[in-house]
Amino acid sequence: AQSVTQLGSHVSVSEGALVLLRCNYSSSVPPYLFWYVQYPNQGLQLLLKYTTGATLVKGINGFEAEFKKSETSFHLTKPSAHMSDAAEYFCAVSGPNAGKSTFGDGTTLTVKP
Amino acid sequence: EAGVTQFPSHSVIEKGQTVTLRCDPISGHDNLYWYRRVMGKEIKFLLHFVKESKQDESGMPNNRFLAERTGGTYSTLKVQPAELEDSGVYFCASSYTSGKGNEQFFGPGTRLTVL
């Protein structure tokens, strides 16, 4: 069984500030972890993923996430927020095959000028 | 390369009516998934096709939902008869079985409103 908890349904930061979106997971098998972003009226776009290997994963648009097995966490960060980062972000976990993904509730990021 | 497409983008129907959603995956992707997001909650898995076979349909809520993927290409999801609680956004995703992590590519979703 797998589950994902995203802490904070809404996060607000100022432009230029650090973005930190929290994700904790549980999985009975080695997890594959994903962050997706959804802009209004669009589908989910993959930001980054962790499968195996290096635990610090870099993605698109300057985002990165670190897989911490001991903490069962996969938090998403970006050093400096841009207005264009305003969107909804989803953390997801799946197993090491082509099976389903389990998603968190999503976190809406607001960026203030 | 075209992405995952879904039709229609929006559908408004009355309780008791039938609606059919369509998903065209990325060409060559053997895996096709349906997910649903209801009332701003989490995105929930409905089912997974590998080619034309249902690999996992554990998320299908009840027998009012019927999914098909004839020929292993596009898929349809029929809701008959629709109920109020079926309202939500239905996402389709596809992936290629590569053994390098299951990166699923999502369509824009179909927003279904049942009145």
Image: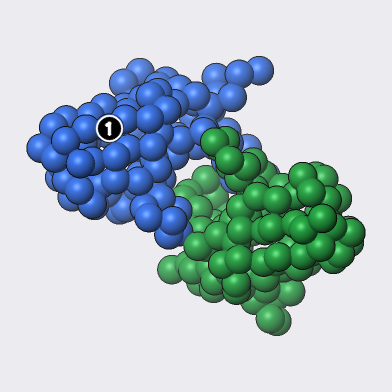
Chain colours: A green, B blue
Asked if residue B5 is positioned above or below residue A29 in the image, the reply reads: above
Asked which quadrant contains residue A13, the reply is: bottom right
Q: What element carries label 1?
A: strand
Three-letter residue code for mark 1: Val
Is B47 in front, or is A23? A23
Q: Which residue lies furthest to the front in this view?
A: A113
Q: Which of A34 and B31 is in front in this view?
A: A34
Q: In which quarter of the image is the C terminus of chain A?
A: bottom right
Q: Which chain carries label 1?
A: B
Which residue corresponds to mark 1? B12
Q: Which residue is drawn at 35% across and 46% down?
A: B88
Residue B112 image offset from top left, x and y in percent = 32, 37
- The quarter holding residue B105 reads top right
The residue carrying pointer 1 sits among few (fewer than 14), some (14 to 19) or many (20 or more) residues within 10 Å by Cα, namely few
Q: Residue visible at 67% across and 44% down?
A: A46
> In this orientation, which residue lies closer to the viewer: A60 or A68?
A60
Residue B65 appears in the figure: no
The residue lying at 50 percent from left, 62 percent from top is: A105
Figure label count: 1
Residue A41 screen position, x and y as percent:
54, 36
In the image: residue B39, left or right of residue B93: left
Residue B93 can be seen in this image: yes
**Residue A13 appears left or right of B87:** right
Residue A2 x/y as whole percent: 48, 67
Is the N terminus of chain A in the top left, top right, bottom left or bottom right quadrant?
A: bottom left
In the displayed image of the protein, which residue is found farthest to the bottom?
A: A70
Q: Left or right: A36 with respect to B114?
A: right
Relative vertical location of residue A3 with respect to residue B18 in this rendering, above or below: below
Up-down: is A112 above or below B111?
Answer: below
Q: Which residue is drawn at 75% across and 49% down?
A: A85
